[in-house]
Amino acid sequence: MVAFETLHCLQRYNSSRHGYTAIKLDMSKAYDRVEWHFLEGIMKKMGFNEGWIKLIMLCVSTVTYSVLVNGEPSELIHPTRGIRQGDPLSPFLFLLCTEGLNGMIKKAEMDGDIHGFSLCRRGPKLTHLLFADDCLLFCRATMDECGRVLDILKDYEEASGQKINKTKTALFFSKATDAAIKNNIKEAWGVPEIMQYEKYLGLPSFVGKGKKASFNYIKERVWRKIQGWEGKLLSQAGREVLIKSVIQAIPTYTMGCFKIPLGLCNEIEAMIKKFWWGQRGDRRKIHWVKWNDLTKSKAVGGIGFKDLAMYNDSLLAKQAWRLLHDHNSLFYKVFKARFFPNTSRLGIQDWALMHGGVFSLGGTLFKGERDSSVDILIDPQTRQWNVEMVEGLFHEEEAELIKQIPLSSVASEDILYWPYSSNDVYSSKSGYKFLKMEEELMDRAHDSVVDDDSQVWKMLWSMNAPQKVKTLLWRACREALPTKCSLFWRKITEEDLCVRCRAATENSLHALWSCTELDLVWEDPELWSFRNEVQFLSFKELLSWIIKHTQLLELFAVTVWSIWNQRNHVRLNQPADAIHQIAYLSKKWLAEYQARQVSPGPSLIHTQPTRCRWLPPPSGAVKINFDGATFPKEKKSGIGVVIRDTRGLVIASCSKVVHQVLSVSDIEALAAAWALSFASDVGVRQAILEGDSLTVISDLREDGKVLAPYGLLLEDVKVLSLHFEELRYSHTKREGNSLAHGLARYALSIPDLLVWMEDVLPQFYYVLQTDLPSFS
């Protein structure tokens, strides 16, 4: 994205002082030409361990090749340079080689021999952008600077073995560059000038007003894929897999950087719809369900196809997330200097200015008030909520929720987190899921009748049956089968009578269940006795009843598929199974299918599960066990802490009530902070902090910031850890933390805080005794 924005600015750069040039390099056989001694020298210069360097060089230099000649392998070929393509280690080794070029260019810039291009007055100067073997160089359009860059590349070629492919290397000049200077530089380099780069890293370098034309290649790729599949006999379920795994993945890379025109998204979706409904060439097919319903998740009755415009927004929001959090990246430095030098990311006035619409999300996913922050609601002296201000600014319910949020004792900047993912970090998947959820909530708000069929859809898609069977049942529930009733309603046929009995209207329920001609299929009284006892209004109602009251879902589904298949064969005058054979053949088919399903084999080693017990700390240290408990009805939470030595003897313990209802993670983090504070007051200096919350312990082991609400409480823990000479974090199961857990639960019965020195509450003696034999 930095490259695209830089080329865009360079094209518009019109300074009369001096022009700039961009040089797109192409390395010929980049991997094959790497000199081994150069790679080794780079690793030594970067400070790698000698043992590691020898190990890597053995991996590189012991490669041999053999060529098949007339089907027979030739003698082994022992290369003297190059790194093998396809090896998972090779890309990283090649990146080490490019560090040589990176260092040479940086040195030339520091010496004043070349000057980078800056997108704006306060922006960083860019001399080069490297991505694997793709390289963009920027310098002033003068003979001195271009000559110096050429000298650097020659030195790099001689040292590394790399060779510039001049037939694929090109120069691009800024708008005001003098024509004579252009000619001199082109003659010195021996490469052509281009008016604009068509593509860089597979994406269009310049996107003007004709955005649709710039991205039309996506539609062409989709069309080629579909054309290659149309001749194959694929079921609708098979086409679904291809659409999700291949077709909808094609625009993902481009959508991560650019806002694709809505018209182009609609055209691609139209192609997908036609393919999924079975259209071939000019033979049109009925689209039985509207596209908006197909893009809903399977849990609410859709198929789960992606709404491309919405998916585009979720991918672009990932870049916005990077701007919010990755302040050390070149991407952030360049875009901040150019688009929001004096404000935060959320304070941009015109989002659409950024990179031709890259961030024109209008705050869909990230919303915030400008020029305000949460810390105005916090008393800076006590580090507690300013109750008067909170209650004055918010409604009573909102104020109560705010006051329940625990605060850190450490003043720090406000941070944004994403509450719709498990790790509170934004991902395009969670962003898309959020947008679809919002859309579905709006649809429900406008619907007069809302049916909760989530259990039906969940059981339908999770049953152990072929995918094409599940798809047929879904279509039957949606009345999306070409029954006579549906065709008559669309004015395709002149009557709606059943093709079998000719006595009733043929909808999905009748065609697959209640038709009298199907009595031989559903005649088994042990299985389908309710057929004549319970009346259903729709096929979805029938399926819901079967899910709730029987264990016959898979058999019912396969039988329904066989009935529909037999009905279509008869209608088309093709060979078909006899009606009375359908029940038997369906049972046989289902049994064969389920028998072929891969299932985990029995374990060869049978082990008895062992109960987790408390383990003592090593000599010279103590173990601090902590736990938190929540009591929603009482609007309270509890903290329990116990400190024990290597013999399992209690040094100190405490139980504390918190007059707030906290989340599980919040109270666990608060308990960890309280445990360290308590241990520090007792005089502990070497310890293991142990709890049964894997989330909290894992986050404490990480160096980075935790974006979740309890992240600031963990910052408290890390600050308190500085009071200890040695501190480690350990996770255990609830059974190994039972004493701290009991103290946390006991907090409900106390007014504030109880501390026991060299003892615990007598009612927990049995727990203490249970832990002691674990190491005696």
Image (spheres, rainbow, N blue to C red):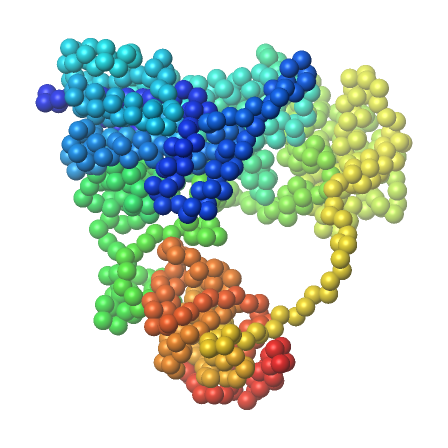
User: What residue is drawn where x is 40% and y is 70%?
Assistant: 726
Asked if 485 appears above or below 442 in the picture, the reply is above
Among the 4 quarters of the image, the one containing residue 685: bottom left
User: In which quadrant of the rendered image does the C terminus lie?
Assistant: bottom right
On the rendered structure, is 44 left or right of 740?
left
Q: Residue at x 31, y 31 (%)?
A: 101
Q: Where is residue 506 in the image (x, y as percent from the top left)?
A: 73, 29
Residue furthest left as drawn? 17
Of residues 139 and 316, the one nearer the viewer is 139
In front here: 679 or 412? 679
From the viewer's perspective, tell me whether residue 54 is left or right of residue 236. Answer: left
So how many labels did they put on this image?
Answer: 0
Looking at the rendered image, the quarter that the N terminus falls into is top left
Residue 325 % position (x, y): 33, 47
Tell me which corner region of the image, top left, top right, bottom left or bottom right, holds residue 346: top left
Q: Residue at x 40, y 33 (%)?
A: 37
Residue nearest the viewer, comparing 683 with 384: 683
Q: Is residue 713 above or below residue 84?
A: below
Tell me if 142 is positioned left or right of 515 in this view: left
Where residue 498 appears, x then y in whole percent? 77, 26
**Which residue lies at the image location 58% right of the left edge and 86% below the top edge?**
765
Residue 96 visible from this viewpoint: no
Residue 345 showing in the rendered view = yes
Left or right: residue 179 compared with residue 76: left
With respect to residue 511, does 463 lie above or below? below
Closer-to-camera residue (521/61):
61
Indicate the position of residue 586 as horizontal and vertical percent values.
83, 35
